[in-house]
Amino acid sequence: IYLTIFEKLFFVIILGGLGLFSFALADFTGWILTYIVVGNVFLAAGELVLTPAIYAFINNYCPKDIKTTMLGTWLLFVGTGGYLGGFYVSLIRYFNQHH
């Protein structure tokens, strides 16, 4: 099955939504570890679909003189997101201990 770049991006949004829904189920049910693992599997699958789609999008639609800049910017966003996610978790831990 061949999917266009935009169809892949739509599929990524669905996988991300399923991952977040699984995390919500972990909060509301007694199967916490199961739904956390399932949610992470959905998010990982979404990331595996997203990364090649982003690279293909940059390759097909960006002007030649800024392709490498766009690839670097994409990696910068991914790295910044990971850092901010860790920072957010540390804030949650801090407020849970002090309030």
Image: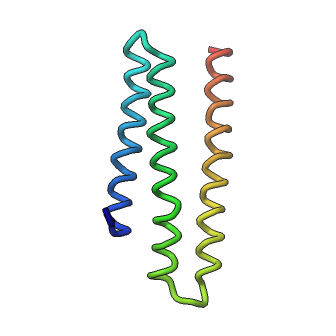
Where is residue 54 shown, x and y percent of the image? 49, 66
Where is residue 92 shown, x and y percent of the image? 61, 26
Q: How many marks?
A: 0
Q: Taking 87 as reference, is 11 left or right?
A: left
Q: Nearer the viewer, residue 53 or 13?
A: 53
Where is residue 85 shown, x and y percent of the image? 61, 40
Instruction: Place residue 6 in its image quadrant.
Output: bottom left
Q: Taking 84 as reference, is 44 left or right?
A: left
Question: In the rendered view, would you say 25 is above or below 89?
Answer: above
Q: Taking 45 as reference, is 91 left or right?
A: right
Question: In the rendered view, would you say 44 is above or below 96?
Answer: below
Q: Nearer the viewer, residue 30 or 86?
A: 30
Q: Nearer the viewer, residue 2 or 26?
A: 2
Where is residue 79 shown, x and y percent of the image? 66, 54
For the C terminus, the quadrant is top right
In this view, the residue farthest toward the front is 1
Residue at position x 47%, y 46% from top? 45
For the N terminus, the quadrant is bottom left
Residue at position x 46%, y 73% from top? 57
Residue at position x 51%, y 52% from top? 48
